[in-house]
Image (spheres, rainbow, N blue to C red):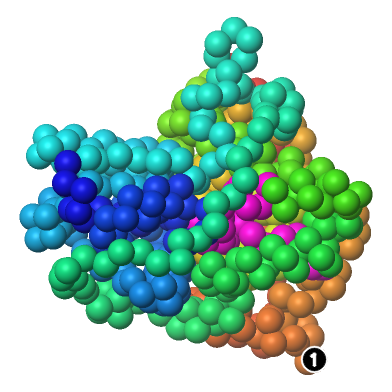
Amino acid sequence: MSDTAPILMWFRRDLRLTDHPALTEAAATGRPVIPVFIHDEVVEDYGPAPRWRLGEGVRSFAERLESIGSRLILRRGRACNVLEGLVEETGATAVWWTRAYDPPSVERDEAVKSSLTGRDVDAASRPGHLLFEPWTVETKQGEFYKVYTPYMRSVKNREVADPETAPSELAAPETWPDSDDLDDWGMGAAMDRGAEIVAPHAYIGEDAAQTRLATFMRDLIEDYAQARDYPGVEGTSGLSENLTYGEISPRTCWHAGLRARDAGKAGAETFLQELIWREFSYHLLHHTPRLMTGNWREKWDAFPWNEDERLTEVKAWKQGRTGIRFVDAAMREMYVTGRMHNRSRMVVASYLTKHLMCHWKIGMHWFEEHLIDWDPANNSMGWQWSAGSGPDATPFFRVFNPITQVDKFKADGYIRNWIAEGQDDPPEDALDYFRAIPRRWSMSPDDDYPEPVVSHEDGRQRALDAYQAREF
C-alpha cells in the first residue's frame, strides 16, 4: 500500500471531528484524507424529517471540515458504485468508515467491503457509534442479553476509553474530486412547509451538540432522574438528536456523565443508564435484526392487531385528533419540533397499540417519517417495548391511562402549549402545528376539539379482552 495514496473517509451518521476513531487514525497516517458523504440507497429510504435533518447535519459538518482546511465531497448513487468511482478518480487505496448495525446499513456495507477488497483496496469499518461493540457483551453462558438490567450491570463498570481530540488539520490531496451541490439533492423537499417550522427547534452540528451537553451537565443533570419524566419542563439532555447523526460521540457523553457522578450530581447515574439503554437497543438489533421488521417475540404474530392504516382511528391518531389530550399534544409536538418527549412517546404508543388495538409497526413507521432524532434501534425497540411484543417489554396488560398520566406527570401546561382548539389566545407552538401539517388535512385552530375516538375505559377493556383471548 502506498504511503502517500489518499484515504477515502466515508462519513455517514458520524458527522463530527472530535472522538472519531476512524478519522483520528486516518489523520495520524499523514496521508491525504478525502472526506466523502454519499446520498446512497440507505439515505434514499429515510423518511422526510430524518432526511432533512441529516442534510442539515451534512451542511454543518462540511463547514466544520472547511474550518480545518479540508472539504466534504458529496456524491449521490449506490454506495458501492460511488466509492468504486472515487477510488478510480483519486487513486485512493483505502476506504474507511464508522461501523453501522441496522440491517439496511449492514447489507450495504458488506457489499461495499466485498467489492473494494476485491479491487485490492483496504476497506474497513471502525467503532465509534457505540460504547460497546454488541458481540463483546455476553452472558456467562456465552449468549447475548435479552433483558436490560443484567445487561446494564454487566457493562456499567467497564472501562471506556477517553474521547479523542479532533484533528487540527487533514492532509489534502493534490487534486480534489468534483462534488455535488447539497442543495441540488433537495433533502428537505418532502418536508414541504414543515421544514421551516421544525428548523428553529433543531440543534444542528458538532458545536451545537457540545454546547447542549455542557448546558445539560451544568444546569439540568442534578434533577434529571425526576425531571426527565415531566414533558412540560426542560428536564432532558436533548442529545438523542445529535447522537443519531454522530454529531457527538457516546464516549464524550459517557465521560461527562462520569464526571458529573464523581461530582455528586444526583441525576448522573440515571443519565449513564439511559446511555446504556441505547447500547442495549443496538445489542439486540445486532443479534436479532428482526427487531426492526417483525415481532421480537414471534408468538405475538398471532395477536389480532389491526394493520389497516385507513381506519378513522388511525387517521385521528396520526393527525393529533384522537380527543385524548395528552396523546394529541404529543403528536403535535412531533410535527412542530421533530421530537417528542419520552414520557409522551410511551403514552402515544400505548394508546395506539392497546386502546386502538393497532399494530406497533404503524406507529414505528410514522415516527420514521416525522422524528428528526429517529434512530433505527431505539425506535423499533421503543415501539416493541410499549406494545409488549419486544424484549424486556412492558406487559401488554399494563395499559397507560392517558387521563391520569396528565396529573401524575404535571402535563397540563404541556397540553395547553400544543393544543390550540378552545383557547382564546393559543401559544405560537400550538398554532405552528397548523402551519406545519399538510394542507390536505384541512385543519384549523378554530375547529372544535374532537370527542375521544376511543375512551380510555373502552379501549382498555377491549385490549384486555383481546389479551385474555389470545391463542399463544
Instruction: Judge whether residue 234 is colored magenta.
Output: yes
Q: What is the x, y in percent for residue 353?
A: 62, 43
Compared with 271, 329 (above or below) is below
Tell me the residue at 26%/36% (across/down).
110
For mark 1, does the 10 Å Cα neighbourhood hold few (<14), some (14 to 19), or many (20 or more) residues? few
Q: Nearer the viewer, residue 182 or 171?
A: 171
Compared with 57, 288 (above or below) is above
Tell me the residue at 24%/41% (across/down).
123
What residue is pinned by disc 1? 424
Tell me the residue at 80%/76% (across/down).
416
Question: Callout 1: helix, strand or loop?
Answer: loop
Asked whether residue 204 appears in the rendered view, the answer is yes
Quadrant (top left/top right/bottom left/bottom right) for the C terminus: top right
Q: Nearer the viewer, residue 306 or 114?
A: 114
- Residue 452 found in image quarter: bottom right
In the displayed structure image, the side of residue 271 where residue 431 appears, left or right: left
Q: What is the x, y in percent for residue 204?
A: 53, 72
Number of callouts? 1
Instruction: Judge whether residue 193 is colored magenta.
Output: no
Quadrant (top left/top right/bottom left/bottom right) for the N terminus: top left
Q: What is the x, y in percent for residue 278?
A: 61, 42
Asked whether residue 316 appears in the rendered view, the answer is no
- Read off the magenta span: 231-254
Q: What is the x, y in percent for residue 357?
A: 61, 42
Tell me the residue at 54%/42% (across/down).
130
- Give the amino acid at mark 1: Asp
In the displayed structure image, the side of residue 80 where residue 63 appears, left or right: right
- Residue 341 found in image quarter: bottom right
Compared with 337, 404 (above or below) is above
Q: Looking at this view, name the residue that lies furthest to the top.
A: 141
